[in-house]
Image: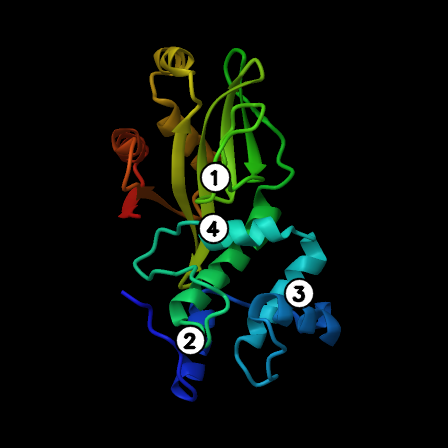
Amino acid sequence: MCPRTLLSGKGTALVSRALEREGIRFDQKRTNISEVHDSSLFLFKRILDPADPRVKLAIKHAELKKKYNFKPINLENGLRAVYASRRKGYRGRWTDSPLSVQQLTQLSRALTNVRLSNKLIKGRKPLEIKGDYSLNFEITNSIMVGKDKRGVTGCPEAMCQLHLRKSGQYLGRIGFNFHVEKGDIVISVANVQGAEGRKTELDEFKEHFRENFGEFLIKRLMGTLGPKFIYRGIRPNGNNKTLYTMSFRKSGITTFKK
């Protein structure tokens, strides 16, 4: 179904409500008009009228760009990411005019995801666990098909990752995103994936820890970031449904359909 597009007048109120709902707040003192214009051109392909509520998104983008100097791939990752919510976002084409509420919702979430990923995940030290195993947080650096020299595949559905390793060898991961609902921060686990060719090692991990790696990583994520967040899982449409379902059920988080 084609998402509902914005109309003048009534559409302005819809945009304002959507941005408020998604927790878009900013400090305009952190940016100047030139930076806001650059972000407006980047996001919307034109300089917006100051009265246009979408200017808030341009200001937020400029503020985050100045503070974190994130890359375009990070924003694109946030736009492609999956968020566990009954209110859906939509990536679509940014050449669409006017944009839909669903597209602006997705852009708002992408910016929130960039902000909280940099604030809460980037630069975290590895976590040691029993034996030769370790866990490390990463920001997704590839959203393309294929894997890097470590065996880590691209992850367009999640901006943040928690990796499981043994003696430095990559065994598997979970991928997750941040968004805001009614003032609460939601963490959506959108990816549970073992490394290709590492079934034996993952079976050994399960035997040693009495938990599959997905359940273990979700619980460790919750234990590390704490109870102030809302944790949700997203069930996939394709393969590995059993792995996702079992990991979510045993870690006790609410699940949503993709």
Q: Nearer the viewer, mark 4 or mark 1?
A: 1
The x and y percentages for residue 159 are 51, 45
Mark 4 surroundings within 10 Å by alpha-carbon count, few (fewer than 14), some (14 through 19), many (20 or more): many
- Alpha carbon distance from label 1 to label 2: 31 Å
Task: Tell us which disc is closer to us: 3 or 2.
Answer: 3
Q: Is residue 32 visible?
A: no
Q: Which residue is mark 4?
A: 178
Residue 43 x/y as whole percent: 58, 66
Label of residue 17 in the image: 2
Amino acid type indicated by mark 4: Phe
Q: Nearer the viewer, mark 1 or mark 3?
A: 1
The x and y percentages for residue 99 are: 44, 72
Label 2 element class? helix
Q: How far apart are the two marked residues, 1 and 3, measured between alpha carbons?
A: 25 Å
Return the residue at label 1. Answer: 155
Disc 1 residue type (three-letter): Cys
Residue receiving disc 3? 62
**Residue type, numbered disc 3:** Ala
Q: Residue at x 54, y 59 (%)?
A: 111
Q: Most extreme residue toward the bottom, as rendered?
A: 9
CA–CA distance between discs 3 and 2?
Answer: 21 Å
